[in-house]
Image (spheres, rainbow, N blue to C red):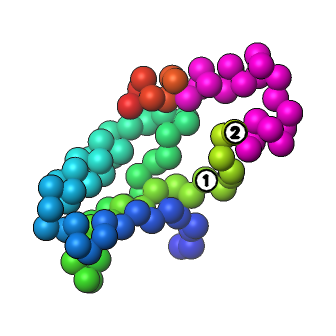
Amino acid sequence: FEQEVALKLLAPHLVEDSFAERFRAERQALAHLNHPHIVHLLDGGVNEQGEPYLATEYVKGTTLDRHAREQRLTVPERLRLFLQICAAVEHA
């Protein structure tokens, strides 16, 4: 099947550092999360070059401030959006 994903790779010079363990912990944490405002982990592992990776849902969009500006969100609308973000962070 074909699917557009977001890939996160650990830079080769960080593979042997403590970053690799933190990257694995991030991948494991994502595997346990199920929230409508947090991307889902689709795959993870090590590529042929020995670089750890994770693949998540690809969410097309823009930055939060740009979105709010372009959509001309009111203060209450911005606060509702902020509360959705807080709920996702709290869940994580």
Q: Say which residue label 1 marks.
A: 59
Q: Residue at x 77, y 19 (%)?
A: 75
Disc number for residue 29: none
Tell me if label 2 and label 1 are in contact, CB under 8 Å: no
SS at mark 1 in the image: loop
Residue 58 % position (x, y): 56, 58
SS at mark 2 in the image: helix
Q: Is 67 colored magenta in this rendering?
A: yes
Relative to 28, say whether 4 is above or below.
Answer: below
Q: Is residue 47 left or right of residue 57?
A: left
Mark closer to the chain start, 2 or 1: 1
Q: Residue at x 49, y 29 (%)?
A: 88
Q: Is residue 15 left or right of residue 61?
A: left
Residue type at tag 2: Asp
Q: What's the magenta region?
A: 66-85
Give the crowd class for mark 1: few <14, some 14-19, many >=20 residues within 10 Å: few
Q: Label 2, label 1: how many angstroms apart (C-alpha)?
A: 16 Å
Relative to 57, say whether 30 is above or below.
Answer: above
Q: Quadrant of residue 1?
A: bottom right
Residue 65 % position (x, y): 69, 39
Residue 80 % position (x, y): 68, 20
Could you tell me what secondary structure mostly forms the magenta stretch?
helix
Q: Is residue 50 left or right of residue 83?
A: left
Q: Residue at x 41, y 52 (%)?
A: 41
Residue type at tag 1: Val
Relative to 90, say whether 30 is above or below.
Answer: below
Of 54 and 19, nearer the camera is 19
Q: Is 46 colored magenta in this rendering?
A: no
Q: Quadrant of residue 60?
A: bottom right
Give the mark toward the camera: 2 or 1: 2
Q: Say which residue label 2 marks.
A: 65
